[in-house]
Amino acid sequence: MLNKLTKIIIITVISMMIPATIIAQKDTKKASLSAASLYLISAKAGAVNYVSGAVLVERTDGKKGFLQKGDMVEVGDKISTEVDGKAEILLNPGSYIRLAGNSQFEFLTTSLDDLQLKVNRGSAMFEVIADKDFTITVKTSDARFYLITAGVFRVEVGETGSGRILVWKGKAQVGDIKATVVKGGRSATMEHGQVAIAKFDRDKKGEFENWSRDRAKEIAKINDKLLQRQMNRSLFNSFGNNSWNPNGYGLWVQDPFSRTFCFLPFGYGWSSPYGFGYSQSIWSYSLPPQMIAPIYQNQNANYNNGQTVMNPPPPISFGGNSGGMPASGGMPGSGGMPASPGPPASETKESFPQTSRPSIVERKREIDN
């Protein structure tokens, strides 16, 4: 009788524990998914966004190994691809370097307003957002190029260290005594201080150029799929952690599932240098004035591949007067931005003091010295 009673008690206890265990597992899984659904926000250069084939890294301390997606490339680290290798590394937000096979590059600086790198061998594609105040300097052992406008560029290194730049779109400046400007559809070869300009056919694209364009298209698709609720939380957290650079063009946002970074522009109505539209921008989210105000000071928020674009939506006055952003505002397909307080209507972007930076010519002299 006692044994029978004991069995009944044990069965009852187990039957009560099973639902509790299932509920606990569900709660744990839900919490895990919630944590995983937050986006990583950054404004740093150097994150590895794509790797295929054999890609090697040699760190400044001499350690060597295979480069993996999600790694960080620091100043002085040498990134090398084997014949089957390709890699994509983030530059300033909105800009990328993509390495072909049998190529090598390293960062000389990763400062977002003075980014410099060196292509030691092979070929690299650059998809960049730039202007006269935010340029990217690309060096070889015997050449120097400045990417001075938004565009698409290819840099090749010859066996003797000569450098050749092909401007698919945008403008570049050669680091010669004449500061030669190279426009779209032209190439410049620099060796021993001498520069040769030539035309090339932009309609003839190889596998490497097509791959670079496909990457740009894929990244634009990730921007389109950003989830509003998770993005709001992630933007709040990253702002509090000082992960923003309001003087730049935008932010890097890493999708937690694909672990791929996409670009979230500060400008409204932007597209990539390849022409793929970004359906979401910082204005697609409901953010408080203290987070938005620094962007109004940013004179770069109006740049989009050198073209005039729609400015950020007009701010709402603290008093809630008309003339601000409608509750359904934002880019189409973004879900709109709910009405929230913004900087006073009188404090438009133009009323904030502008930051003075050296021009490309001044910067060129500083670097050359």
Image (cartoon, rainbow, N blue to C red):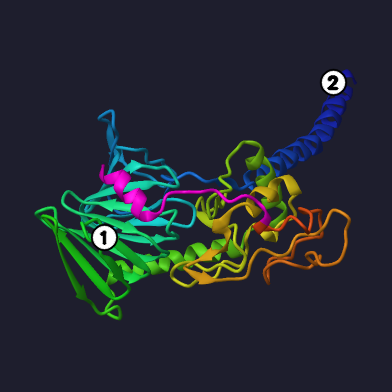
Q: Quadrant of residue 296?
A: bottom right
Of badges 2 and 1, the one in the foreground is: 1
- Given residues 187 and 241, the one toward you in this image is 187
Q: Position of residue 280 (x, y in %)?
A: 63, 63
Badge 1: few (under 14), some or many (20 or more) residues near its Cα, within 10 Å? Answer: some
Q: Is residue 260 left or right of residue 104?
A: right
Tell me, yes or no, whether the highlighted magenta stretch contains residue 118: no
- Given residues 220 and 148, the one toward you in this image is 148
Residue 60 appearing in the image? yes
Q: Residue at x 24, y 56 (%)?
A: 175
Total number of numbered labels?
2
- Given residues 163 and 4, the one toward you in this image is 163
**Disc sitting over residue 99 in the figure:** none
Q: Quadrant of residue 135?
A: bottom left
- Mark earlier in primary sequence (2, 1): 2
Q: Position of residue 152 (x, y in %)?
A: 37, 66
Instruction: Classify the position of the C terminus by image quarter.
Output: top left
The magenta span reads: 351-369
**Disc sitting over residue 179 in the figure:** 1
Q: Amino acid at mark 2?
A: Asn
Residue under label 2, please give it: 3
Q: Residue at x 21, y 66 (%)?
A: 188
Tag 2 secondary structure? helix
Q: Quadrant of residue 86?
A: bottom left
Q: Residue at x 26, y 73 (%)?
A: 186
Q: Position of residue 354 (x, y in %)?
A: 58, 51
Rounded to the nearest angstrom, the CA distance separating label 2 from label 1 is 96 Å
Tag 1 secondary structure? loop
Vertical comparison of 272 with 234: above or below: below
